[in-house]
């Protein structure tokens, strides 16, 4: 059951992603009515002579941002330039992730992560937890306290990493079962457990198979990495010679389904794109980390044209920012490099509604419309013409001097 809130009305400038197209409606002066369950009851223009004052003057209201790919135990090594993907993992990431065996350290970072989400206007995230069960548990607890929405997985890895990061398959799956029992579906499904193999190289076939069975048994979302780096792809081909391609490794173990979310997908072959689309799986596009690690440029426009669900991901710590507005700007730059521009209106849609769809939550969040949960943010923005939608979108997404987020609501309740 949800905790009821006092019904309220918000007045202000509104950006409303549409349900049926990757476009956004703009109301220069609108009203949003939120009921006691934190659900949007009505949206419309403010009538002439409206007595409701502007709720947060100087801001624009829109659905909360959705980060479809972020690493909790990498927060404090974001921006460490130690090489391409596999080298970066060995030189920078593994040592930091080992620190999450310490519950106090994990608790501090979990609180910091939640603060970063709120400061950036991210109301929902798909999070790679630690490979340590206790650290993943304290992250769930922190998200619960702050009121944010998330799906979180204990990162599964039982080889090709330091011993203190690996957990053998049977023990890892038992730990996942305990986390599922405690947290999956918590608070009317605000928090979910997500089956999270780090990537094919970090998991034995036994662990991959067990992860697929776990996801199927509990009808769980799945997240992992796919086709990020040429060296990674070559290593996967050598490790799994029976597989037709990288995606086939996951498919053989029951991990390529309509509930799957694959991070990066930069270098997929044509058969892989076909298999991904046929499975109904989604993609987390992480342009900032792709640039930072020199991994490549994902064909965003082609992916959308294929009808694949796509959300945007910060991928902190290879990503250097929690701001989904900056990630959208990075996606814009990447699309230009591919010669297939994706404009600001579509990018804002991907950062909100698109991310919700990628997480299988498109019927619940991502829209500023009746019947959707009131997961909303108010972002300060300065424009010369309040009625100019193009100017508003450019100011919101492309300014390097990003204006602050002034209010963050999840189900109409302020996230703190």
Image (cartoon, rainbow, N blue to C red):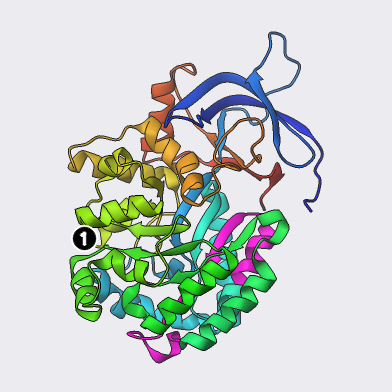
Q: Nearer the viewer, residue 117 or 365?
A: 365
Determine the image quadrant of residue 6: top right
Q: In the image, is residue 182 above or below residue 256? A: below
What residue is drawn where x is 51% and y is 46%? 356
Q: In the image, is residue 139 above or below residue 165? A: above
Question: Is residue 225 in view?
Answer: yes
Determine the image quadrant of residue 264: bottom left
Q: Residue furthest top?
A: 48
Local crowd size for mark 1, using a 10 Å CA cut-off: few (<14), some (14–19), many (≥20):
some
Residue 139 in the magenta stretch? The answer is yes
Residue 176 position, x and y percent, is: 57, 77
Q: Secondary structure at mark 1?
A: loop
Relative to 170, is 412 on the left or the right?
right
Q: In the image, is residue 246 above or below residue 94? A: above
Which residue in the protein does label 1 denote? 294
Residue 414 in the magenta stretch? The answer is no
What residue is drawn where x is 72% and y is 57%? 187
Relative to 37, is 77 on the left or the right?
left
Q: In the image, is residue 158 above or below residue 145? A: below
Residue 408 position, x and y percent, is: 62, 44
Residue 372 position, x and y percent, is: 64, 37
What residue is drawn where x is 62% and y is 74%? 179
Residue 137 position, x and y percent, is: 62, 74
Q: Nearer the viewer, residue 221 or 17?
A: 221
Query: How many numbered discs?
Result: 1
What residue is drawn where x is 61% and y is 43%? 364
Q: Nearer the viewer, residue 95 or 40?
A: 40
Relative to 72, is 339 on the left or the right?
left
Which residue range is magenta in the image? 138-167
Q: Nearer the viewer, residue 229 or 148?
A: 229
């Amino acid at each position: 059951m949800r905790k009821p809130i006092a019904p309220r009305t918000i007045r202000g400038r509104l950006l409303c992603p549409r349900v049926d197209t990757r476009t956004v409606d703009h109301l220069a002066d609108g009203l949003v009515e939120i009921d006691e369950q934190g659900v949007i009851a009505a949206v419309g223009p403010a009538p002439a002579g409206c007595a409701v004052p502007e709720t947060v003057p100087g801001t624009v209201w829109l659905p909360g941002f959705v980060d479809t790919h972020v690493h909790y135990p990498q927060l404090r090594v974001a921006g460490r330039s130690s090489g391409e993907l596999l080298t970066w993992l060995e030189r920078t990431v593994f040592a930091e992730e080992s620190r999450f065996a310490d519950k106090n350290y994990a608790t501090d970072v979990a609180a910091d992560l939640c603060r970063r989400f709120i400061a950036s206007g991210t109301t929902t995230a798909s999070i790679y937890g630690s490979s340590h069960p206790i650290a993943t548990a304290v992250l769930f607890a922190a998200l619960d306290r702050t009121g944010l929405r998330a799906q979180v997985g204990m990162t599964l890895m039982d080889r090709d990493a330091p011993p203190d990061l690996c957990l053998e398959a049977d023990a890892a799956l038992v730990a996942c079962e305990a986390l599922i029992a405690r947290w999956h579906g918590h608070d009317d499904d605000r928090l979910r457990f997500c089956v999270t193999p780090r990537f094919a190289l970090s998991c034995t076939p036994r662990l991959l198979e067990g992860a697929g069975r776990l996801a199927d048994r509990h009808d769980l979302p799945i997240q992992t990495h796919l086709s990020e780096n040429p060296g990674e792809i070559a290593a996967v081909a050598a490790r799994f010679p029976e597989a037709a391609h990288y995606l086939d490794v996951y498919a053989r173990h029951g991990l390529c389904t309509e509930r799957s979310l694959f991070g990066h997908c930069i270098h997929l072959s044509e058969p892989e794109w076909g298999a991904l689309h046929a499975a109904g799986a989604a993609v987390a596009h992480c342009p900032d980390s792709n640039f930072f690690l020199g991994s490549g440029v994902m064909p965003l426009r082609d992916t959308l044209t294929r009808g694949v669900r796509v959300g945007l991901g910060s991928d902190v710590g290879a990503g250097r920012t929690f701001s989904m507005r900056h990630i959208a700007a990075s996606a814009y730059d990447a699309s230009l490099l591919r010669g297939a521009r994706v404009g600001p209106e579509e990018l804002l849609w991907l950062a909100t509604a698109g991310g919700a769809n990628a997480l299988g939550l498109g019927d619940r969040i991502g829209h500023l419309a009746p019947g959707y949960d009131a997961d909303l943010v108010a972002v300060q923005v300065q424009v010369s013409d309040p009625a100019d939608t193009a100017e508003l979108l450019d100011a919101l997404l492309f300014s390097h001097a990003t204006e602050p987020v002034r209010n963050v609501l999840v189900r109409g309740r302020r996230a703190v």
